[in-house]
Amino acid sequence: MISHVLEEYLEAIWRLQERTRPVKTGELAQQLQITPGAVTNTLTHLEKHKLIVRKPYRGITLTDKGRAMALRVIRKHRLAERLLTEVLQMDWSRVHNAACELEHAMTDEMLGPLEKTLKEPTTCPHGNPIPDESGRLHEEKSEPLSDFKPKDKTVLVKITDEKPDVLRYLASLGLMPGATVEVQEKAPFEGPIIVKVMGATYALGRNVASVVQARKL
Amino acid sequence: MSCHGILDKTIQKVDVTVALAGNPNVGKSTLFNLLTGLQAVTANYPGKTVDLNLGVAKYGGKRIGVIDLPGTYSLDPTSEDQWVARRAILEERPDLVVAVLDASNLQRNLYQTLQLIELEFPVVIALNLIDHAEKIGIRTDYQKLSKLLGVPVIPMVASKGKGIQELLECLTNKATTTPAKRSTAFDLCLERAIHRTEEAIKSDLHETPYGLSTRALAIRMLENDPEFTKLVRQEVRGSRDVELTEELSKSIESEYHEPASLVFARQRHELARQTTEAVQVRARQPPLLSQKLTHYAVSPYTGIPLAVGVIGGIFAFMLVAGGFLGDMTSFLWANFASPSIRLVVTTAAGKGVVSRVLLWGFDAGIFGALSVGIPYVLTFYLVLSLLEDSGYLNSVAYLADTMMHKIGLHGRSIIPMIMGFGCNVPAIMGTRVLTTRRERILACTLITLTPCSARIAVIMAAVGVFAGWQYAVAIFGIDLLVIGAIGWSLNKLLPGKASGLVMEMFAFRRPRASTILKRTWFRFKSFMLLALPLVTMGSIALGAFYETGYLQILLAPVNPIMYALLGLPAVASITLVVGILRKELTLQLLIALAVMQYGPSASNLLLFMRPLQLFVFGLVVTLYFPCIATMSVLGRELGRKSTLAIMTSTIALAMLIGALAYRTLPAFGILS
């Protein structure tokens, strides 16, 4: 049985590492709001359990085992947040801390029924994706929105356009990762497509639709 | 009119100022008209073409100044309409913002309302279209919505005047003009960052830009809002705050794995979703007829024939109605207006040069503006308003998107482009539906090359009648090729990339005559106010040159060039210059001058111009720079520099292609 502290560490490392780069000890200490000296001890412990790999001058990366464990904690955390906002009607801004406590007390058996009660949410109240049972985030497999057929229901995974203005504009319409996007119409000859997002309908030119990555629901 | 303190300047003595904000197509203009009647004026920021409508509502002995903001989805300045909406709301600081929401699409609509509440404006929600929402099975708990957001909520059906009394009551009631009791709450991580930024702002800045609250400024800065970041950086100790927010944004980004601005957007959307779910119940209902129609209008097999039919119908309508109105205008002008103007001018200025110059302006000039305005601009606006109000415009845009992308435009430009065949002027004004300047320049350039009805008349009468119809058709063919080639190459040459189409598709709804007529009238009025003085002054200037003989003197050195280059006789260059007044004048004047010079028989143009010369003449008239009315709208829409660039390049293009035709065609044994 892994302790709460170790879980917190794995979660923090995963959050920092998600951008596919090794995590520096200093960053981790800052994230956890403790001194770098205290971090080192626990890291040695994690390494012994083969949950992380440390390379001098490069930093910390999670092993497959560590990553799976981290995602399990994230899953609990995000489901706990849902539980607090949806069932207990707690204020949105207050649930983060409570969820930090709850996540460690939740057993794996609780999660299935909890998901059912919450109507299988795909994201936490803040819109971040909830990893599935096998500890996977769905983000890995996605295809351009333009490759789907009319009547396909999809979840938007990412937008590969880098321009902040474009991202911001699309986001203001609700076109952002995690959003449910239903393809309604598709014009022939590389024409635009019509999608439904958050109850509103938009036509997206093919060049826009091709930078929007989604996966089928 | 500049927008700084627009209300003070244009509307005097109001007791309270309100701004109407909301998404496009939520009935905002309907509400504005309902509140203010027909006495509205428009204003715009320098260099911006998105207008603000201003008006006054009266209620209970109070005058309420109303600013109608452009319909936008958010307050981020990512497009021109959003920029204008935001600037107006920040600069004018209305006492109250009315967030007009579509009850049938509450979740998306609430996003902007949450942004308004964040800015700590006193907000009143006008929940519009509740009849439509109920028809599709959506019921809203207004009181709960009001309680959740801490702002008054007034259910409305603006098109039927329902709820207007309650709204006016609310606008004039002091109690409602206080900010919402609570702001939107973000999650702990964001709130912490907001708090830290607020602390820094409080200690570093004397005052915040636009007098925003520290919280509102903190949120905008953490979202990396370019405008506020720049304004804060200019403050003495502002760069410290900017650095702090950049650092905080970065840590938000590493926490959530996406840019801070998206994290804020996401949380707002989530709040909007939760609020909507808490206050609305949805009953399942079979799709309405209008929803099925939308499907048929955009599926290729039914949609394309329908679009071709509708566009053909519009064109026919514009030809018939425009032709009729044109004849009426000419008739009334020639029989009533013109004689009285002539009488006044000749009585005042005699029969000399001065009087003739004045007649150029006040007779021919005003007639020129009217003969474009009434038959073409008015009918175009009527059709455009109808297409907009019914929601069909977007279906056509959707279908045309693929085709228009080839020339660097997107689907929305199809309607103005087609309308260019009737008259370039309203077509250019119609390019406002396009969002980027690049697209506007492209579309406007191509529109000025589109043969309008006046040019079609010249081609048909001069070339079709005297040189043969196949040559008239050839001119149209060459013109279309030129448009395609110019569009294609401009798309490659202009900096930037063609922006993608992102357009909301509205369900069809029954167009309302009052809305359409009012919108048509406003647009027509703004066109006439713009064109009338410009065309009159331009005509007087041109008339002065012509009547004093200076035009002929000035053109004397040009004539040999015209002859050498294009093979055109001397009279032709004068007609081309005068043709900037109205293109069909080129032909009328050509005949008139020819008759003066060669006697009455010269009205058969073949007596002094060969078919080849007529062909070249028709080609040049079609391509060379637009008429004075077109130039004046171009100047207003794009600015002087771009207008000048378009003018000179189309002249050069006309000369080049004319010269090419003159040199090469005889070599192939075509025309002589």
Image: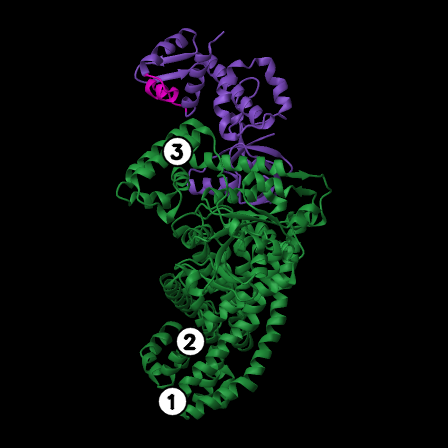
Residue drawn 55% across the image and 36% down it: A145
User: Looking at this view, is B133 or B609 the one in front?
Assistant: B133
Q: Position of residue B111 (x, y in %)?
A: 52, 42
Question: Per the image, is B133 magenta?
Answer: no
- Marks 3 and 2: in contact by CB < 8 Å? no
- Marks 1 and 3: in contact by CB < 8 Å? no
Mark 2 and mark 3: Cα distance apart in space? 68 Å
Residue drawn 45% across the image and 18% down it: A11
In primary-sequence order, the first of circles 2 and 1 is: 1
Query: Which amino acid lies under the numbered mark 2 shown in the image of this protein?
Result: Leu
Q: Secondary structure at mark 1?
A: helix
Q: Which chain does the numbered disc 3 sit on?
A: B
Question: What range of the chain is rendered magenta?
Answer: A20-35
B280 to the left or right of B405: right
Query: Which amino acid lies under the numbered mark 3 shown in the image of this protein?
Result: His
Query: Which amino acid lies under the numbered mark 1 shown in the image of this protein?
Result: Val
The relative height of residue B670 versus residue A17 in the rendered view (above or below) is below
Q: Quadrant of the N terminus of chain B?
A: bottom left
Q: Which chain does the numbered disc 1 sit on?
A: B
Q: Which chain is purple?
A: A
Question: Per the image, is A27 magenta?
Answer: yes
Kindly identify which residue carries mark 2: B576
Q: Is residue B244 visible?
A: yes
User: Looking at this view, is B37 or B537 the one in front?
Assistant: B37
Kindly identify which residue carries mark 3: B195
Q: Colour of chain B?
A: green
Q: Is residue B410 visible?
A: no
Q: Position of residue A186 (x, y in %)?
A: 61, 42
In primary-sequence order, the first of circles 2 and 3 is: 3
The relative height of residue B531 versus residue A147 in the rendered view (above or below) is below
